[in-house]
Amino acid sequence: MLGAFVNAFRTPDLRRKLLFVLVVIVLFRLGSAIPTPGVDYVKVQAGIASVEDQGIFGLINLFSGGALLQLSVFALGIMPYITASIILQLLVVVIPRLETLKKEGQAGQAKITQYTRYLTLGLAILQSTGIVALARNGAIFGNSGGGESLLVDNSLTTMLLMIITMTAGTAMIMWFGEQITERGIGNGMSILIFVSVVSSFPGALWGIKQAKGWDVFLLVIAIGLVIMAAVIFIEQAQRRIPVQYARRMVGRKMFGGTSTYIPLKVNQAGVIPVIFASSLLYLPSLTSSFSTSNSGWSG
């Protein structure tokens, strides 16, 4: 595999695409570490260090590459775009206008993509508003938050600035993904999701090694590799439907009679249902956090 990676850099066009993807990944990780203006960074770091159970926020924090609980510029991560894409896919089935657009080919797909962008920004505004409210109430870290605000001040201007910044960060992530798809290699959104999830692995593995020792550490790595191999196997598995072409006579020669197959993926849905389910789980947890917090927006 290392040899294939080295050979890829020897091809000028492929090397340029790989370097572009790497630059975008660096910018993505940089934005995940920059705090949103108006956040008390010291209190945020203290909350992260003391939190024991992050609940659903820990799951969303995983998809944002650790940016959510740090209240960074890219705190929302890729989740608003994923949710918007899934909603549009469902609406295409029930709304005739969208179904017609889908059948119009590339022009219709471009229109649906534009609708996805608008819906992403709308969801980003809603989610960033909820996160800022939780940060103001000190409830984003659960019981460990103590009800203490994580903002520098609780003015409306500061909260609006944070909402605008997080929404703009989501728009930037969406643009990053589209640029990787157009000018890089592979699906840009999938690459950003992969980077977000993998970025938490080193710290988590090191924590396991420090707490449980080398035996458990190596066991976790072995189990992870087995699971990865199983996922790849299922993802690549396909059911082949045989197709037999009839023979036909052309002049004095017989043509046809060959056989081929139609490949059908075993896992047609992919990972979309899992991601969508995690998005739905976000809503009741957010509502619960609001109801159990000590103060509200007017507090």
Image (cartoon, rainbow, N blue to C red):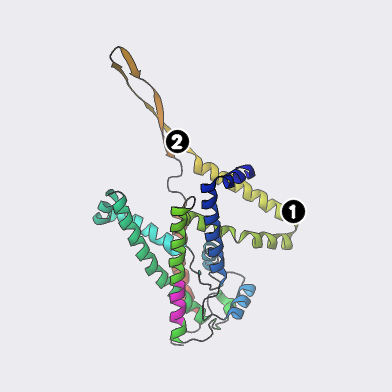
Report if residue 160 lies within the magenta region.
yes
Task: Write down the region rendered in magenta.
Answer: 159-166
**Residue 291 in sight from this viewpoint:** no
Could you tell whether 212 is left or right of 178 in the image? right
Q: Which amino acid does label 1 sit on?
A: Asp
**Residue 208 in sight from this viewpoint:** yes
Q: Residue 215 carries which label?
A: 1
Instruction: Answer whether labels 2 and 1 touch (C-beta < 8 Å).
Output: no
Residue 79 image offset from top left, x and y in percent:
46, 63
Instruction: Identify the residue at horizontal 24%, vertical 56% (top origin).
Output: 97
Report if residue 212 lies within the magenta region.
no
Residue that protrudes farthest toward the top in the picture:
252
Could you tell whether 132 is left or right of 40 in the image? left
For disc 2, the marked residue is 239
> Alpha-carbon neighbours of circle 2 within 10 Å: few (<14), some, or many (≥20)?
few
Q: What residue type is labelled 2?
A: Arg
The secondary element bearing badge 2 is classed as strand
Residue 35 image offset from top left, x and y in percent:
55, 75
| Quarter of the N terminus within the rendering | top right
Considering depth in this image, is 208 or 262 the residue closer to the camera? Answer: 262
Mark-to-mark CA distance, 2 and 1:
39 Å
Instruction: Identify the residue at horizontal 50%, vertical 41% (top origin).
Output: 236
Considering depth in this image, is 265 or 256 the residue closer to the camera? Answer: 256
Residue 274 image offset from top left, x and y in percent:
47, 55
Magenta: main secondary structure = helix
Could you tell whether 90 is left or right of 128 in the image? left
Instruction: Identify the residue at horizontal 45%, vertical 58% (top origin).
Output: 179
Q: Quadrant of residue 287?
A: bottom left
